[in-house]
Image (cartoon, coloured by chain):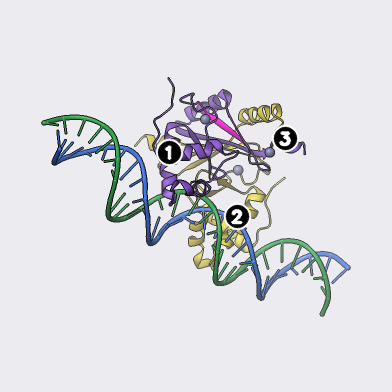
Chain colours: A purple, B yellow, C green, D blue
Amino acid sequence: MTATHELTRNQALVFNALTKAESPLSAYTILDRLRDDGFRAPLQVYRALDKLLDYGMVHRLESLNAFVACAHPHCGEHGLIAFAICEKCGQVSEFSDVVIEEQVRDWTGQNGFKPSKTTVEIRGTCASCLNS
Amino acid sequence: MTATHELTRNQALVFNALTKAESPLSAYTILDRLRDDGFRAPLQVYRALDKLLDYGMVHRLESLNAFVACAHPHCGEHGLIAFAICEKCGQVSEFSDVVIEEQVRDWTGQNGFKPSKTTVEIRGTCASCLNS
DNA sequence: ACTGATATGTTATCTTATTACATAAGTTGC
DNA sequence: GCAACTTATGTAATAAGATAACATATCAGT
Ligand SMILES: [Zn+2]
Ligand SMILES: [Zn+2]
Ligand SMILES: [Zn+2]
Ligand SMILES: [Zn+2]
């Protein structure tokens, strides 16, 4: 039921850093924030991220080369996820959309394409940044 | 009507390299292919790409850090574009989807988010790679 | 020719990600 | 316990992708 995984020390540190962050973090920013916890090399971050991505606890934002903690880390498997990314403040909203999911399935079905992962990222300006 | 732009030498070379390519090219691959034409530095490629992206003649695939010539370079402004990217052979199919476009508009409208660019990339295996 | 805008060339640097190799720690079966 | 195996870590080096800074050059309008 619950998708919580037993995390290793490094994985927990990385996940924690992402959960505390207000916005997406690059791998190297994570590294910097974990220097005091003994992190010394990018690979320590990337290896932890790989697992966390596997577990679905973290998502990668392709258009930013950055990572965010999942907004629903206990829901297990997601359907198709979309992100709205504010270019002003960096805030990210994660949401699922079954209509888009179905539309993707339609296209792939009709074209004999077997999808493995779908990226949907909306760049723009968030409501609170528009009011300022 | 037509969206064809007068291209500079460098822009034309880059666009041509992308048009001839069977699959997306990274900026550095483009650079290598244009060595004989006098290209020496990444910036020459990136500057040309910037313009071509502006003109809508080239698209950037965020999940690949690579670039493709637009499949419909003469249609002027696109609506929302989606890409299906085969991870086996590298082939990319570009298509527009008004349903996804409308779904994105719904979400952004309801959330007061002003979108500037939307990325939709489906990774997977294409039909011809599945039959082999 | 003077001016301003756009395009180029070149070097250095920065950011992001992976390869390679060595070591440590946990798990399973005996 | 111990061998055999798998998983996790540590560290250094390097590859791949992108930009900053600065100097020139080209072209249009006046
Ligand atoms: Zn999620
Ligand atoms: Zn914002
Ligand atoms: Zn296009
Ligand atoms: Zn294929």
> As displayed, is residue C1 above or below residue A78?
below
Q: Which of marks 1 and 2 is in front?
A: 1
Q: Which residue is drawn at 52% across and 26% down?
A: A106
Which sits in the foreground, C9 or A132? A132
Front position among marks 1 and 3: 1
Q: What residue type is labelled 1?
A: Gln
User: For the residue marked with disc 3, what is the amino acid?
Assistant: Ser
Q: From the image, tell me which residue sits under label 2.
A: B49
Q: Where is residue A73 in the image (x, y as percent from the top left)?
A: 50, 28
Main SS of the magenta part reads: strand
Instruction: Point out the frontmost of discs 3 and 2.
Output: 3
Q: Distance between the residues labelled 1 and 2?
A: 38 Å
Residues at marks 3 and 2 on the same chain: no
Disc 1 secondary structure class? helix
Left or right: D17 as drawn, with respect to B132: right
Q: Name the residue under label 3.
A: A128
Start-end of magenta stretch: A79-84
The chain ID associated with circle 2 is B
Cβ of mark 3 under 8 A from ligand 2: yes
Q: Where is residue A111 in the image (x, y as percent from the top left)?
A: 48, 31
Q: Is mark 3 on a helix, strand or loop?
A: helix
